[in-house]
Amino acid sequence: MVRTRLVGLLSLLLVAVPTVAGAQDAPAAAASGDEVTHQALRAIKQDMEDALNRQDLDQLLSHLHPDVVFTTMNNDVRVGKAAIRAYYEEMLGAPHSVVKKVTAKFDVDALTRLYGNTGVAYGSSRDHYQLSDGTDLVVHGRWTCTLVKEGDQWLIAAFHYSTNVFDNALLTKVKTAALSFGALAAVIALVVGFFIGRRGRRPATA
């Protein structure tokens, strides 16, 4: 009887061990799968950054979903690759475009949050703008990106870009110009007041 119970216990253990091992391997396998995904997303981020910096629009668009929604820093919203191409060419490639050249460095705050075939990434950027009027600006931005997986490819479905409206390089430039204009206006007012005062103090003639 004791021998029978012992054999039964050993059999139970032999059945249980693979089950426990399988339970332990499942999270490891999931983690390994997530790491492959994160590596793929890192590669997309780097490739898009490189494409933007060398102004390779075709390569940039290759990572976008056909129905991508892009909210720009100037509150413009473009939907679809054709609209984004038109925006890029309007802002950077046209003869009378505002921007002459832009380079950017994108950093992520954390691993992309994965929800099945959807991912949400967010982070910061340091953007160097050379404007057509000779202005040179460095803008610190924030961005949020939503990605979807179609087949075996991750594509950007939405991208939202913003900057601090209360503290940024463009605002500083405007403030500086306003202060300079204000100082110039004050000097002009003083000069005008001085001459008006002199005219008012001329001695009366007999």
Image (tube, rainbow, N blue to C red):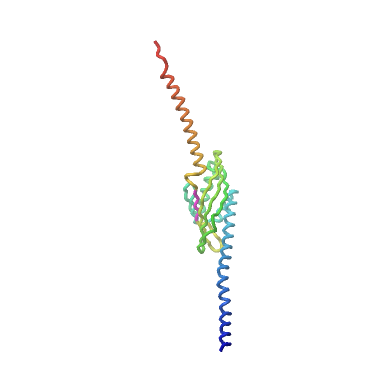
**Residue 161 falls inside the magenta stretch:** yes
Residue 11 picture location, percent across and down: 57, 82
Residue 7 picture location, percent across and down: 58, 85
- The answer to which of 119 and 68 lies nearer the viewer is 119
Q: Quadrant of residue 24?
A: bottom right
- The residue positioned 56% from the left and 41% from the top of the image is 136
- The residue positioned 42% from the left and 16% from the top of the image is 202
Residue 100 picture location, percent across and down: 56, 43
Name the quadrant of the C terminus: top left
- The number of numbered discs placed on residues in the rendered structure image is 0
Magenta-drawn stretch, dominant element (helix, strand or loop): strand
Query: What is the magenta range?
Result: 158-162
Residue 132 picture location, percent across and down: 55, 40
Q: Which residue in the rendered view is the most extreme toward the top?
A: 206
Q: Which residue in the rendered view is the most extreme toward the bottom?
A: 1
Where 19 falls versus 74 (above or below)?
below
- The answer to which of 199 and 131 lies nearer the viewer is 199
Name the quadrant of the N terminus: bottom right
- The answer to which of 106 and 155 lies nearer the viewer is 106
- The answer to which of 4 and 188 lies nearer the viewer is 4
